[in-house]
Every structure is written in C-alpha cells, then in structure tokens.
Image (cartoon, rainbow, N blue to C red):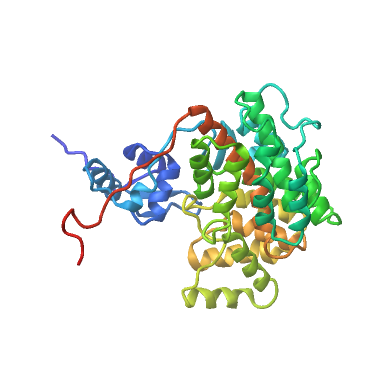
Amino acid sequence: MKTVSSPAFLTAREAAAELSVSPATLYAYVSRGLVRSEPVGDGRARRYRADDIRALRARRRSSGAVQPSAEAAIPVLDTTVATITEAGPIYRGVPVVALAEAATVEQAATLLWDARRADPFDATNMPVLDDAMRAIFAAANEAKPLPRAIAVLALATDADPRAHNRSAEGRAATGARVMRLVTAAILGTAPSPLPIHRQVASAWAKDHPAAEDLLRRALVLLADHELNASTWTARCAASTGVSLYDAVIAGLAALKGPRHGGAGPLAARMVAELGDGDVAASIADRVALGEQIPGFGHTVYVDGDPRADVLLRALSAAGAHPRLVVHVPRLVTEATGLYPNIDYALAVLMRTLGLPVGHEMALFAIARTSGWIAHAIEQLQSGILIRPRARYVGPEAGRAAG
C-alpha cells in the first residue's frame, strides 16, 4: 500500500481548522512565535508549518501543558458583536472595510448595538447634565481629554434617570447619550446631536476640505476590535451590573495605558520625526539599533492591517504627503517585514490635519466608546459575572520561600 505523506505546510484555513480556532487566533499564535509561517509568492498570503500546528494542537490537548502565551489567544467567551478576520473586523456580519466607505460612526454603533427599532441617535436623545457635571466641564477645561471624560462620566449615572433602563431600546438610547457625552467631554464642547465626525472636524480641522470624510472613515474603522484590553475591561465592569456610563469609564481607563492607546502617540511622534529629512537613513538607524518601529506590525494581522490600508488609501486620495502614505510604509516593510497598522494610519491622519500628538488617542476613545457599549450591553443581557480563575504557580502549601 502506498503511504500518503502529510504536507509540510498548511493554508491559513487548513491550519485554523486543525486547531479548531478562528483565523484571528491563528495569527495571534504566529505573532507569539508558536507557529512559523512564510509568504507565498509576491502577495500577502502565507503558509504555515504543519509540524508547528500539530505540535501546538498536541500541547493544547494535554492537560496543563498549554503555554501561557497560547492560552492568551484562546477565545474566552461567545459574542455576536464582532470578530476579527484576515480581511479586517466584522461588525455583526458586516465587514468594516465595506462599512467605512459610507457609514457614520452612529450607524456603526447602531449596528454593533443591534438597535433595530427606534433610532438611538434621535436629535432629542441628548445627555443629561446636572450642575455638578457642568462644574466639572468648566473646571476641567484645561485637562487632557480622557481624564476630563472620565471625570464627567463619573457623575453621569446619578444624573440620568434612564441610566439603568433594561429594555433593548432603553440601553441603546443610553448608549447614544453616553457617546454624545464622551464626544463633548473629549472635544471640550457642549453636547450636540450633530453627526460625531462633523463635531470632531469642526473642533479640530474645520479648514481642511477632506477632514469630515477622513474622520468619518477613521471613526468607523476604530469602532470595535473584539476583545482588546479596554473592551475586556469594560465587559468585566459591566458584568458586575454597573451602568453603561461606568462601563465606559473602565474602558477609558484601560485605553490610557501606554501598551494600548499609548501606541498612537508613539507612532505620531515617529511620523513627526520622519516628516522631514532622510527617511531611509532614519529607518535604517532604528532597525540597526534594534528599536521598535511604532505603528508597524500587529499581534493579529500578520499580513497587514486592513483598517490601515483603507485609511491610507483615503489619505492618499485626499492629497496626503506620499512620503508618509507610500514611502515610509514601503521602507519599513522592506527593512522589517512588518506592515503599517491602524496606529500608523491614524498618526498620518493627525499630521495631515495639522493636529498635535495626543489627538489620535482622543479620536480612538470617541470611536471605541461605541464598541465598549456594545460589549457592555451584551454582557448585561447575559446576566453573568465574569470571574476567571488564575493558574497558581507559587510555592506549595507549607513550602513557602523562607
């Protein structure tokens, strides 16, 4: 009988099927060095080492033998809100790449919240501000955007008599009020029923002809990204029964971290440095010194972040400098093998609009509020308290270090 040998490489679909995981989880395994991959031809497609896939599958099946880095990529809960694919995020079955072509962040939010009846963003559904909140608005006028938003939101639950409405329509309506309040607090403006991208453009870049459309696209692309650190934090908070206002506070606090939202300012600083001078030499020096290239590479999108591709193409069409839209990404990819991610595209957007470092995190917060609310609503609907267990690796009982 002729023996059929096993293939040395698998496609992404085959590898994910072998492991019984999503493509996003497969890409996370690759980024953590658990699975080796290599490009196929001249495109972005890759193939995956079959022996690595099978070794990882065997470790996962062995009780207690899964490496902590592998466990981090294993799905921990079911959701109908969104998922991540090689082609980018999908919001309730709708690819964000397509959604960003014409949708507003309000439409993306309504989709993420599964609001099918009344429009939660009706012009009359405005945030409730009491005297204490107005005082905070005034006192925090010079504060940074995210701390100002957190301070205002801290009093919003008590001020809003509908904050704990449990109906689907009530929660969606509360979500819209939260988004409008967060937008106002971050921009330092009065709450408004105008489309959020228009509010942002008016506050930050009213003289740029392409600002509204560029900001609209960015807000939609950033609305959700499954269970990143801030979304997981928001879900954990929501699982205790807090209001949507308080769940968003949790998300904002996590976003402030340098390893999450802080990635945007780092990319923005690099873009500012590369705006002038010898780009090739600067990138070569960074690579030679072993420095990280902010805004390039992604733990999920090994073959490039589709959200960055969409925004960079829009920036190019709007007349953004080719140095930043084309030349820098090409040089970095040639030098490192890493592709630009959404942080880099946001940094280029901010520079194109003439905005200082820090605005990219503020825009991220406005957009991602919609995703935090979607996940918080889903968690509240489940009625389940998130209470994971830790794997104890300390000394055995009676054998503590002396």
Indicate the position of residue 384 as horizontal and vertical percent values. Answer: 45, 31
**Residue nearest the viewer, comparing 196 with 129:** 129
Task: State the quadrant of the N terminus.
Answer: top left
Say whether residue 398 is left or right of residue 109. Answer: left
State the residue at coordinates (51%, 40%): 235
State the residue at coordinates (37%, 41%): 388
Say whether residue 184 is left or right of residue 347. Answer: right
**Quarter occupied by residue 389:** top left
**Residue nearest the viewer, comparing 177 with 240:** 240
Q: Is residue 284 above or below residue 39?
A: below
User: Can residue 65 be seen in the rendering of this structure?
Assistant: yes
**Residue nearest the viewer, comparing 188 with 268:** 188
**Residue nearest the viewer, comparing 343 with 131:** 131
In the displayed orientation, state which residue is furthest to the front. Answer: 131
In the displayed orientation, state which residue is furthest to the top. Answer: 117
State the residue at coordinates (76%, 41%): 129
Indicate the position of residue 362 as horizontal and vertical percent values. Answer: 67, 54
Task: State the quadrant of the C terminus.
Answer: bottom left
In the displayed orientation, state which residue is furthest to the right. Answer: 207
Q: Is residue 2 above or below residue 38?
A: above
Q: How many marks?
A: 0
